[in-house]
Image (cartoon, rainbow, N blue to C red):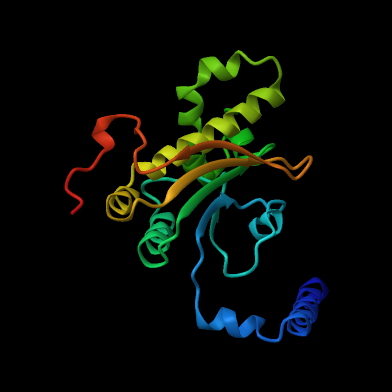
Amino acid sequence: MKQVEELLLENKAWAKEKVMEDPQFFERLVNIQRPDFLWIGCSDSRVPPNEITQTQPGEIFIHRNVANMVVHTDLNLLSVLQYAVEVLEVKHVIVCGHYGCGGVKAAMTRHSFGLINKWLRNIKDVYRFHQEEIEALPTEDERVNRLIELNVKEQVLNLAETSIIQKSWKKRNYPYLHGWVYALQDGVIKPISTLGPNSTLHHPIYQYDNLD
């Protein structure tokens, strides 16, 4: 319990410091939420979105899951996406992975992890799509990190294939979709891919034609 109590004490100290720096800080947060960004990131505790982008509370709408996945049957993710795009009208959606991701490493093995097997199956599919390229790399670290990059790229494409994004592209010409990978070793983000309203999808079958 001592660790939990320490968190609460740190919270009080942080709140007091914020008010001392900016007396209207919390009043602004209460009145409105109008972020320009939706962040879809990994649940890894070493990748805090606000800290690594030096943004303030209220500037990024955040969703996190194991290995920063965009799964078309994930109602949690889709609800966040719809709210961010249709209500908050974000201008950018960022899928951010990170090198050394444990979820991706686990998906590259044949070991059973129980319930999470169902989730990791989506990453295994990305591996299968790009198996020849990945297995051509000489070291395990290189293979893992390349799959991390390819997984981010695939999740950005998965976003573009949703009716939520396509409808917004048709109506507003937003949001732009970005794939990034964060390096734990030096704290630097590497851009991987960007898609916008005129981007080409995997295949025309994913393009909706009745979104008016």
Query: Does 93 sit left or right of 87 as displayed?
Result: right
> x%, y% of residue 207?
26, 38
Please identify the quarter of the rendering in which residue 86 is found.
Answer: bottom left
Name the residue: 47% across, 23% down: 128
Please identify the quarter of the rendering in which residue 19 is found.
Answer: bottom right
Residue 133 against residue 106 in the figure, above or below: above
User: Looking at the image, can residue 83 be seen?
Assistant: yes
> x%, y% of residue 151?
52, 34
Query: Does 201 sit left or right of 80 as displayed?
Result: left
Figure label count: 0
Pick the residue in front: 99 or 210: 210
Name the residue: 65% across, 67% down: 56
Which quadrant is home to the C terminus? bottom left
Which quadrant is home to the N terminus? bottom right
> x%, y% of residue 81?
41, 57
Please identify the quarter of the rendering in which residue 158 is found.
Answer: top left
Query: Does 54 sit left or right of 106 as displayed?
Result: right
